[in-house]
Amino acid sequence: MSTVDPRTVHAARTQGTHCIFLDVRTPLEHREVHAEGVTLLPLDRLHIDAVQALRSNNEPVYLFCRSGTRATQAHAQLSAAGLTGCHIVEGGTDAWVAAGLPVVRGKKGMSLERQVRIAAGFLVVLGVVLGATLHPWAFALSAFVGTGLMFAGITDWCGLGLVIARMPWNQVGVGASAQAACCPGENTKV
């Protein structure tokens, strides 16, 4: 697995090296802030055909997420499918912003992590209230959510996060070229 410092990637691009920047975060995260010139292709829609459609001459592909976890997952997925020339931008968009490199800022939204914390907290409280007032089996909801949070912490995979990422309020748009490649027949939302 290849990781590259954001300044190195920016310097290469500034000197005229043609490369593909892919942001594998959610559309909402992308809208808030992203590296200049990056194409949005969310991890849950990532497919080798979509990436190949963006490449013309086997250019290097630089994968961005917030801090590196989803880019690592995208790299593993694309490598397993036989795609070469993929690199993870070390520290992701957070590191890109911290380095003072060019970004596009848009409307700020509630982060996916915050939405997951709110939903998990609500479900735990709901389980306790229902367990105390209706039936003791309702406490199982709280236990289920707690188990899910532990699983997410251990594996760095969160099913609740994947569900929330697909909610309508989190769908703010996918780039037209990536939309055509990864989601044929879907309309791009703006």
Image: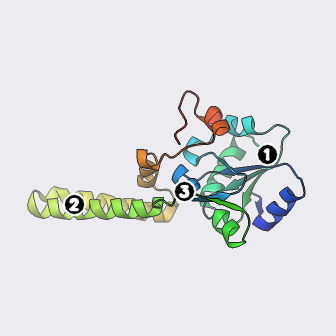
Residue at x-position 49% and y-position 64%: 154
Chain-order first, disc 3 or disc 1: 3
Which percent across, then down, holds residue 67? 62, 65
- Quick one: label 1, few (<14), some, or many (20+) residues within 10 Å? some
Q: Residue at x 44, y 61 (%)?
A: 151
Asked whether, in this view, residue 59 is left or right of residue 62, the answer is right
The secondary element bearing badge 2 is classed as helix
Mark 3 highlights which residue? 29
> Residue at the location (62% across, 53% down)?
73
Question: Of the numbered discs in the image, which one, if any, rests on residue 18?
Answer: none
Depth check: 69 or 17 in front? Answer: 17
- The image shows a total of numbered marks equal to 3
Q: Is 89 situated left or right of 14 in this image?
A: left
Q: Dot 1 corresponds to which residue?
A: 84
Q: Is residue 2 left or right of residue 126?
A: right
Q: Earlier in the sequence, mark 1 or mark 2?
A: 1
Q: Evaluate if marks 2 and 3 touch, with contact meaning CB atoms under 8 Å apart.
A: no
Q: Which residue is mark 2?
A: 126
Q: Quadrant of the N terminus?
A: bottom right
Taking depth in this image into account, of 28 and 138 the one nearest to the observer is: 28
- Taking the image as shown, residue 66 lies to the left or right of residue 166, namely right
Up-down relation of residue 177 to residue 150 (above or below):
above
Q: Is residue 167 visible?
A: no
Which residue extends farthest right? Answer: 15
